[in-house]
Amino acid sequence: MANTPLLELEGVDVVVGDKVLCSDITLTINEGECHILLGPNGSGKSSLLHAIMGVRPFELKGGKALFRGQDLRDLDTTARAQAGLGMAFQRPPRLTGVSVRSLAKAIGDGDHFDESVKQLGLEHLANREVNCGFSGGESKRFEILKLTAQQPALCLLDEPESGVDLEQVGVVGEAVNNLLDTSAPDGTDRAAIVITHTGFILESVHSTTAHLMMNGKLVAEGAPQEMFDRIRSEGYSLVDVAS
């Protein structure tokens, strides 16, 4: 089991009802790896992460979809979280009546809550209802706090730096990097899939591989910073970015 990938997708489609959003996705994530997912808006990046996490109405169909050797489709969203999957959402929901402190402690390890909220600059929100009146940056930082509490083996981060003020981008990046640099409670070297448009997160996170998604397909992969720089200078229409 030591060599079993954390996540193994082979020939998988992402669907909502009868509509195919992503097709023939093949992707392997091993322990300790951080994969960057690049691509234009509407290319299917967020849909893929939602389907991996089991967020309805997104589903994985066909092919092979394994997490730690177990078929993901046998697990609902809660079971996937318990197995070691966690996601920081791009647009997290408001939770009326639930405080940041109570949710973080309910999700997982509450022992380091005060330390974590201080690191993320969220002390003033500790007793506030989740995402009620939060700025975009505060919502994103709470999502990182949530993952820090949950301690998943594989983190799915949907644009963690988008909507974050420039002075807080480094704070978010450092928090993400600190999370990925530590092992999961069971000793697994934590891994991640990170969606980014701005590229700021690349300055903080030690990423291993980047993938370009176009029209619901993974069309290229390469070194993260090199791929991002080429896309920034030449555009997403450059498919052969890995050459």
Image: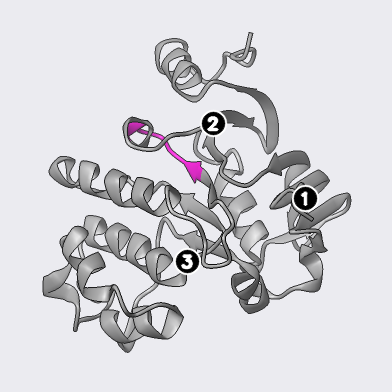
Write down the quadrant of residue 208 in the picture.
top right
Above or below residue 197? Residue 154 is below
Provide the secondary structure element on which disc 2 rests. Answer: loop
Marks 3 and 2: in contact by CB < 8 Å? Answer: no
Which amino acid, by three-letter code, is at mark 1?
Thr
Q: Residue at x 43, y 34 (%)?
A: 206
Q: CA distance from mark 3 to mark 1?
A: 20 Å
The C terminus: image quadrant: top right
Res. 163 mark: none
Q: Which residue is mark 3?
A: 151
The label nearer to you, 2 versus 1, is 1
- 2 or 1: tag closer to the N-terminus: 1
Provide the secondary structure element on which disc 3 rests. Answer: loop
Q: Which residue is mark 1?
A: 4
Which amino acid, by three-letter code, is at mark 3?
Gln
Q: Position of residue 39 (x, y in %)?
A: 53, 32
> Observer-nearest residue: 48 or 40?
48
Which amino acid, by three-letter code, is at mark 2?
Thr
Q: Residue at x 60, y 66 (%)?
A: 84
Res. 208 mark: 2
Q: In the rendered structure, which segment of residues is drawn in magenta?
A: 194-200
